[in-house]
C-alpha cells in the first residue's frame, strides 16, 4: 500500500446553519490522482480548501505531508501547488510576470518557469496580459503557477469547468503528466467522464457527506454490476430464446430491436452463445457498460446534473 | 519575503500604469488642475486675504485630497481584487497578507510622492508657497497623515463587499471629515454639535498638524495631533486586521 499523503479524519464545516461538510474522512495516497466528485454545492471546494489550509474546519483533523494545514499553512504552501476555483489574476499582469512573481515567492529552488510555459504551450503568450487569455490558456497558466515550486501535492479544483472538449482533453493530458512526475494530485470535478478517465480513485460526495470511496472500476462493479446488450435481429423466435437465458433479467423488444439487461459479465457471453448456437442473423450488436454516472444515480437517487 | 514584497510592489506599480488613465488620472490631472487654479488665482496671491489661503490653506487641502484619493483608489483596488478572486489566489501562496497590503501601500505612497513632486514643481512657477516651506518636516507630517488616512481606508477595504461600494463609502466618510476639519471654517466658528463631532474626527488633527508644520511651528507644539493620529493608526490597523476578508 502506498504511503498516505493526505489524511482527513471526520472534518465538519458549517456556514451559519448550512452544513457544508459533514464528518468527511478519506486518505489520499502518494503518487495517485484522487478525485472528489459530486454536484455543485456538495462540499467539494470547502473540503479541498480545508485541506489546503485556507479554511479551518469546525472540528476534525487533517494532515497533509505530516503537517496541520491550518496551523502550518506557510510551511505547507511551500510544498504544495494550488489551483483554485474561480480565481483570477490581475487583468493586466503578463504571463511571464505572473510566473516570475510566483517563482520569487517560494524558498526552495523552483522549476524553470520558461520550460513550464513551454510544456504548457504558453510560450507564444509570454507577453500577453492575463485578461486577453482564453479560458483554457488561463487554466494552463494556473497549472504552471501550481507547479512552479515543484510541489509534492497538487490541488486542482474544477480544473476544466467552462472549457471546450478539446481544451479539456489537453488539460487531462497535462494532469496525467503531473502524475507521471511522481506527484500526488488531489482534484475535484462534477464531470463524471473526467473522473472516470483521469482519477485512480474517487470519493463521491453529496450534501457534505462522502458516500463511497474506491477506484472508478470498483465503484461501478460494486454498485452497478449490470450489463446491457443492444442488438437488432429479425430471427423469428429471438425474444423467447433471450428470455430463456439464465442471466437475462429483462428483455425489451421494439420491432426488431432488443435491449437485454442482466447482472454481471455473464449475460453478454450468454447472448453471444445463444446467437451463435441458433445462427441468428444480427444487423447490430453492442454492449453498454455502466459508468460512474450510473453509480452516482444509483447512490443518490438523482443525476449529478439535477 | 522581502524579495517577494519588492517584486510584488514593482509588479503592481507596472500593472497600475497599464490601466487606462492610470498614470494620467493619478499623477498628471491633479497637477494640471493645480496649475489651472494657480493661473486663475495667481494674481490674487498678492492681496493679503488671498495670500493667506494660498499660503496655508490650499497646500494642505491639496495634500489631503491627494492622500485621500490615493487611499480611495487603494480601497477600490483591494475590493476589486477581493471580488475577482485575486486576493484568494495570492493567499494560497507563501505570501503573508501583510505583504500583499504593504505592496499596495508602497505603490500608493510612490504615486502620491510623484504627484506631490510634480505639484511642487508646478507650484514653484505659480505660487508664492515653497519659498519658506519646511519641506522635510512637511513631508514627514504628510507621511504621518497619509498613514492615518490609510489606516481608515484599511477598515473600509476590509469589509466593503464590492468595488462599486468602495468609492462612494469612502467619499461619504472622507469628504465630510475634510469639510469639518477646520480647513474652511475655523472649528470655533462651528455650531456646538459639529464642533464636538469634529474633535472626534481624525481629519481635524491631520489639518491641524499640516497647517502648523507648514507655517513653521515646531513638532513639540503638535504632540497632541501626533498622538491622536498614532492612536487612529493603531486602532484602525488592529481593527482591519481582525475583520479583513479575503473573499
Image: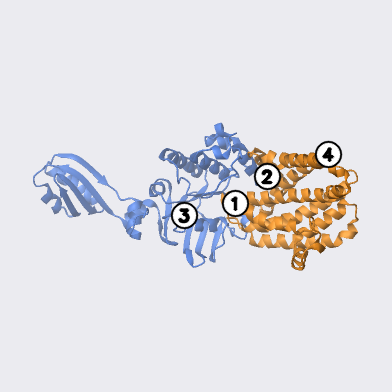
Residue designated by label 2: B8
For numbered disc 4, what is the local secondary structure? helix
| Residue highlighted by disc 1 | B163
Q: Which chain letter matches label 2?
A: B
Residue name at image x 60 percent, y 54 percent: B165
On whether disc 2 and disc 4 are found on a single subunit, the reply is yes
Q: Which residue lies at the image location 91% right of the left edge and 46% below the top edge?
A: B132
For residue B110, the mark is none
Q: Is residue B102 shown to the viewer in this render?
A: no
Do the CB atoms of the residues marked 3 and 1 lie less than 8 Å apart? no
Q: Nearer the viewer, mark 4 or mark 3?
A: 4
Q: Position of residue B8 (x, y in %)?
A: 68, 44
Mark 2 → mark 4, Cα distance in angstroms: 38 Å
Apparent side of residue B240 relative to residue A276 in the rendered image (left or right):
right
| Chain letter for the blue colouring in the rendering | A
Secondary structure under tag 2 reads helix
Mark 2 closeness class: few <14, some 14–19, many ≥20 residues within 10 Å: many
Q: Which residue is mark 3?
A: A1
Q: Which one is in front, A27 or A161? A: A161
Q: Real-space Cα distance between discs 3 and 1?
A: 50 Å
Give me the chain letter of mark 1.
Answer: B
Q: Chain of mark 3?
A: A
Residue B57: where, in percent of width, then height?
82, 51
Q: CA distance from mark 4 to mark 1?
A: 38 Å
Quick one: which chain is orange? B
For the question of whether residue B21 can be seen, the reply is yes
Label 2 to label 1, Cα distance in Å? 21 Å
Q: Which mark is residue B126?
A: 4
Amino acid at each position: 500500500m502506498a504511503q498516505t499523503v493526505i489524511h482527513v479524519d471526520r472534518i465538519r464545516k458549517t456556514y451559519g446553519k448550512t452544513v457544508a461538510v459533514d464528518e468527511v474522512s478519506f486518505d489520499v495516497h502518494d503518487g495517485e490522482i484522487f478525485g472528489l466528485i459530486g454536484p455543485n454545492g456538495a462540499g467539494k471546494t470547502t473540503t479541498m480548501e480545508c485541506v489546503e489550509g485556507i479554511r479551518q474546519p469546525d472540528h476534525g483533523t487533517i494532515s497533509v505531508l505530516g503537517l496541520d494545514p491550518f496551523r502550518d499553512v506557510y510551511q505547507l504552501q511551500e510544498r504544495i501547488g494550488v489551483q483554485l476555483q474561480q480565481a483570477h489574476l490581475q487583468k493586466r499582469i503578463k504571463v511571464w510576470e505572473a510566473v516570475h512573481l510566483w517563482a520569487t515567492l517560494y524558498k526552495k529552488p523552483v522549476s524553470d518557469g520558461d520550460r513550464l510555459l513551454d510544456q504548457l504551450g504558453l510560450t507564444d503568450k509570454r507577453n500577453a496580459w492575463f485578461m486577453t487569455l482564453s479560458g483554457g490558456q488561463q487554466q494552463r497558466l494556473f497549472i504552471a503557477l501550481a507547479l512552479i515550486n515543484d510541489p509534492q501535492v497538487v490541488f486542482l479544483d474544477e480544473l476544466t469547468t467552462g472549457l471546450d472538449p478539446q481544451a479539456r482533453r489537453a488539460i487531462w493530458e497535462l494532469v496525467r503528466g503531473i502524475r507521471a512526475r511522481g506527484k500526488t494530485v488531489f482534484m475535484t470535478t462534477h464531470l463524471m467522464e473526467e473522473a472516470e478517465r483521469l482519477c485512480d480513485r474517487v470519493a463521491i460526495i453529496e450534501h457534505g457527506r462522502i458516500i463511497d470511496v474506491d477506484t472508478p472500476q470498483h465503484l461501478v462493479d460494486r454498485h452497478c454490476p449490470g450489463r446491457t446488450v443492444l442488438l437488432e435481429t429479425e430471427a423469428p423466435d429471438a425474444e423467447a430464446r433471450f428470455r430463456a437465458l439464465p442471466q437475462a433479467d429483462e428483455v425489451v423488444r421494439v420491432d426488431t430491436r432488443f435491449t437485454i439487461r442482466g447482472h454481471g459479465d455473464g449475460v453478454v457471453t450468454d447472448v453471444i452463445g445463444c446467437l451463435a448456437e441458433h445462427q441468428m442473423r444480427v444487423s447490430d450488436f453492442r454492449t453498454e457498460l455502466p459508468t460512474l454516472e450510473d453509480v452516482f444515480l444509483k447512490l443518490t437517487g438523482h443525476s449529478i446534473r439535477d | 519575503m522581502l524579495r517577494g514584497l519588492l517584486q510584488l510592489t514593482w509588479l503592481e506599480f507596472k500593472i497600475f500604469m497599464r490601466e487606462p488613465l492610470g498614470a494620467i488620472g493619478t499623477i498628471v490631472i491633479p497637477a494640471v488642475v493645480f496649475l489651472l487654479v494657480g493661473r486663475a488665482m495667481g494674481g490674487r496671491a498678492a492681496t493679503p486675504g488671498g495670500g493667506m489661503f494660498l499660503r496655508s490653506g490650499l497646500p494642505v487641502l491639496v495634500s489631503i485630497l491627494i492622500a485621500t484619493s490615493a487611499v480611495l483608489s487603494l480601497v477600490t483596488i483591494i475590493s476589486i481584487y477581493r471580488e475577482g478572486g485575486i486576493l484568494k489566489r495570492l493567499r494560497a501562496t507563501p505570501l503573508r497578507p501583510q505583504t500583499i497590503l504593504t505592496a499596495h501601500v508602497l505603490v500608493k505612497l510612490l504615486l502620491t510622492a510623484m504627484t506631490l513632486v510634480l505639484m511642487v514643481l508646478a507650484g514653484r512657477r505659480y505660487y508664492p508657497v515653497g519659498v519658506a516651506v519646511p519641506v522635510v518636516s512637511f513631508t514627514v507630517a504628510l507621511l504621518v497623515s497619509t498613514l492615518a488616512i490609510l489606516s481608515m481606508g484599511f477598515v473600509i477595504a476590509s469589509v466593503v463587499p464590492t468595488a462599486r461600494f468602495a468609492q462612494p463609502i469612502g467619499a461619504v466618510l472622507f469628504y465630510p471629515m475634510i469639510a469639518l476639519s477646520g480647513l474652511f471654517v475655523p472649528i470655533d466658528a462651528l455650531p456646538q454639535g459639529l464642533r464636538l463631532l469634529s474633535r472626534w474626527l481624525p481629519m481635524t488633527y491631520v489639518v491641524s498638524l499640516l497647517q502648523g508644520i507648514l507655517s513653521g511651528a515646531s513638532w513639540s507644539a503638535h504632540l497632541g495631533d501626533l498622538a491622536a493620529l498614532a492612536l487612529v493608526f493603531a486602532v484602525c490597523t488592529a481593527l482591519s486586521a481582525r475583520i479583513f476578508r479575503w473573499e
